[in-house]
Every structure is written in C-alpha cells, then in structure tokens.
Image (cartoon, grey):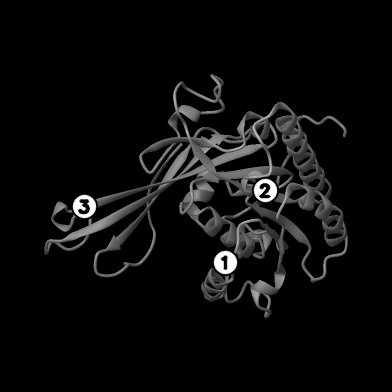
Amino acid sequence: MKPENPLHLLSQKCTTGCPIIDRVLSGGIPCNSITELVGESGCGKTQLCLQLLLSAQLPISHGGLRASSLFIHSEFPFPLRRLKQLSLSFCSSHPHLLPSQDPCDFIFVRAVQSAEELLVLFDRIDALLTCPPSKLPVKLIVIDSIAALFRSEFENTPADLKRRSSLFFRISGKLKLQAKRFGLSVVVTNQVVDVMGSDGINGLRVGNLSSLYSSGRRVCPALGLAWANCVNSRLFLSRNDEIVSKDSGLVDGGDGGTDVVRTRKLQVVFAPHLPEAACNLLQILSTAKISRLTVALYSTD
C-alpha cells in the first residue's frame, strides 16, 4: 500500500442522523477507516448502528452515502422489529429524498458465529462490493459485535492469546483493505469489562481510558490493547440512570412522584481526525409512561 500524507486525505462521512452527534464527530462516521463503538449492554450501540444503515441511503448532499449497507451480526436475534420501526420513521422524515422502495431492501444482513466464519465471509463480501445486488452500491459495513466472536472460544493461555491477536490483525487488515479499495465506512461494536485496580490496561493508558465510566462503574473496552491497535477511531457510549423527584424542577410537572432521568453520553476516546469531545443525550422515563424521546443537552469539544 502506497504511503500517503494523512493531512492531504479528504474522507467522505456518513451522518448518524443526530445533529448533536454529527457535530462532535465533525460530520459523522468517516469512510476509508474502521470506527469502533464501545459500550455496555443497553447503552444504544445497536440502535445507533441501525440508524446508520438508514442514514447511509441519504443523498451525499444531505450527509449520506447514497448507498446500501451490510450488517453482520453475532448477537442474536437480529433486531428486525426495531429496524422496521426506525425505517417507518426515517421514511416519514425524508419523504422526498429516498427512492420509492422500502429502505430495508437496501440493507443486507448476515449472521456469523466465529472469527473464522467472518474471515471466510470476507471473500463473499468482495463479490458483493464489486457487483452489488441493488442499484445502490454498498458503502457501509457494520459488525455487531466483534467481542461476541471471541467470547468463549479462547482460553487465557499464551498460545490462545497469540492466535487471538493474529485473528484481530487478519480481520482488521481485511476490513481496512476493503474500506480503502471501495471507499467504505466500517463500524464495529465492542463490549466493556469492569476495571479493577490500577489505571489503564496492565498499566498502559489507551486514550482517555481513566475517564470511562458507565452505570457508575469504571470500565474499559473488551479485547485488550491488541484490538485497540486495530481500529482507527474509538467512540465510547455510556449510560447513567438517576431517579429524580418531579418537584425538583429537572422534569416537567410538579405534582409529586418520581421519574427516571436516563443519560447517554457519547465520548471520543481516540481518533486521528477529532479532538477530545463528548455529548450528552437525555431521556426521561415517567413512572406512568415513557415520555417522548431524546433531548440533546449539550456537547463539549
């Protein structure tokens, strides 16, 4: 691969569908690289990925890629019902920008259960990228999640750790090659583990690792330092639920009782093209019913 000056590279980006998140990411998820989305279960990783599958179909002038997407999932079952709900909302929000077909027709889904199966799949992905089955080219690949492929197959032995690291580099190398060759935006999700003891992973600091907290616990991305070196950008999604009184003034209504204020935070851990930044999203869950969704509070950059 020919060396290039990164300062001279212009990368197309895919909008996330949220202006606040797009502002933190300087326009969205970049093409020609791997973006990792890290977070605990229930923090919104898959939700954001499903939104990206739809946003990629938007015209380039509206922040999309005018493209189809490939969703590779290792977490079961595939959230088809949620995707259809998002698709209906997406169509109503962009009635004049999308083709007459169902947006789900431009999303290709494949399940994998092991890292070896994913590597075998890459050869078929090359054919899909070269000759897409729809009129829109495939420009977005999402893998949800990479950690699930390594959850139980490997032991904590030198031989298994070496084999696992080798698979990391083979998978990421193939993804980076495809991203560069076809101008793809590649998104992978990862899980977190609790941090016990000293700062960092085995004393090593990866990005702003010391500030990663979710649900009141200090956490770090799964798969360790070897995988951290395989991705170009890492974004961290965290959650925090707080029970507040309606009399506190933080939520509408002062007739007593309590609500759950659920905060989601998106944080840039490291990225070659982004400064350290974060944004908070607020959701109020009423004790009587779920109120209308997400209100952006602020972004810091």
Q: Tell me what residue is drawn at x 64 percent, y 33 percent.
A: 228
Give the mark count.
Answer: 3
Q: Choose mark 2 or mark 3, whichever is in front.
A: 2
Q: CA distance from mark 1 to mark 3?
A: 31 Å
Q: Amino acid at mark 2?
A: Leu
Q: Is residue 212 above or below residue 130?
A: above
Q: CA distance from mark 2 to mark 3?
A: 39 Å
Looking at the image, residue 70 sits to the left or right of residue 198; the answer is right
Q: CA distance from mark 2 to mark 1?
A: 18 Å
Nearer-the-camera pick, 8 or 30: 30
SS at badge 3 = strand
For label 1, the residue is 79
Looking at the image, residue 65 sits to the left or right of residue 199; the answer is right
x and y, in percent, of residue 161 in the image: 70, 31
Q: Residues within 10 Å of mark 1 (few under 14, many from 20)?
A: few
For label 3, the residue is 244
Q: Amino acid at mark 1?
A: Pro
Q: Earlier in the sequence, mark 2 or mark 3?
A: 2
Q: Choose mark 2 or mark 1, whichever is in front.
A: 2
Q: Tell me what residue is drawn at x 63 percent, y 72 percent.
A: 97
Q: Residues within 10 Å of mark 2 (few under 14, many from 20)?
A: many
Q: Amino acid at mark 3?
A: Val
For label 2, the residue is 149
Quarter holding residue 15: bottom right
Q: Is residue 4 above or below residue 86?
A: above
